[in-house]
């Protein structure tokens, strides 16, 4: 796995909405995280090959591959790093599909405070310690 670029926990945000990506990265940086955002699954896969992340935030609806398939692909190469869905796909079936694909949590847009709370729960500390995977049934 490639080296981590910073001592701060690093989050990769994958969402096809550019305005949302800018807003989320700004908010994460304000919360003292490193954050990088990409708009496609292809960019996300490429990013995972060149940089190590402490957590992934994935939208279920991407333009080039759905987020559920992307989640499975990330899990294939990175089985331990937490993956959180943050999506407008609000059906219970979508949440179950996300968890089945390997995500640790599924937060429905636009609950940004809920997403930030979930990110903080899954990142073990702001000192750059490795991410800790917490199974859903232990939260």
Image (cartoon, rainbow, N blue to C red):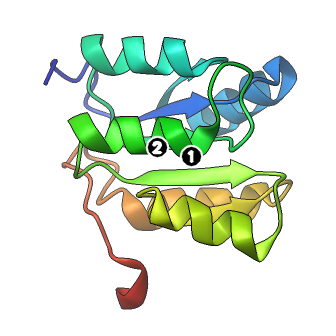
Instruction: Where is residue 42? Give x, y as percent.
Output: 51, 14
The crowding category of the residue bearing disc 2, from other C-alpha atoms within 10 Å (few below 14, some 14 to 19, many at least 20), is many
The crowding category of the residue bearing disc 1, from other C-alpha atoms within 10 Å (few below 14, some 14 to 19, many at least 20), is many
Q: Is residue 129 above or below residue 50?
A: below
As helix, strand or loop, the secondary structure at mark 2 comes to: helix
What residue would you read off at disc 1? 68
Do the CB atoms of the residues marked 1 and 2 lie less than 8 Å apart?
yes
Q: Is residue 104 above or below residue 33?
A: below
Query: Is residue 123 at all visible to an observer of this figure?
Result: yes
Q: Nearest the camera: 1 or 8? A: 1
Q: Nearest the camera: 89 or 50? A: 89
Q: Residue at x 62, y 27 (%)?
A: 65
What residue would you read off at disc 2? 71
As helix, strand or loop, the secondary structure at mark 1 comes to: helix
Q: Residue at x 16, y 18 (%)?
A: 2
Instruction: Where is residue 18? Give x, y as percent.
Output: 80, 18
């Amino acid at each position: 796995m490639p080296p981590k670029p910073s001592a701060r926990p690093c989050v990769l945000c994958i969402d096809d909405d550019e305005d949302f990506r800018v807003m989320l990265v700004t908010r994460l940086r304000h919360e003292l995280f490193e954050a990088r955002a990409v708009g496609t699954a292809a960019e996300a896969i490429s990013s995972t090959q060149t940089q190590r992340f402490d957590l992934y935030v994935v939208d279920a609806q991407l333009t080039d591959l759905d987020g559920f398939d992307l989640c499975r692909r990330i899990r294939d190469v990175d089985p331990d790093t937490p993956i959180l869905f943050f999506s407008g796909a609000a059906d219970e079936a979508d949440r179950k599909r996300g968890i089945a694909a390997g995500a640790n949590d599924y937060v429905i847009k636009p609950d940004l405070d809920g997403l930030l709370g979930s990110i903080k729960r899954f990142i073990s500390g702001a000192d750059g310690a490795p991410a800790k995977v917490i199974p859903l049934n232990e939260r």
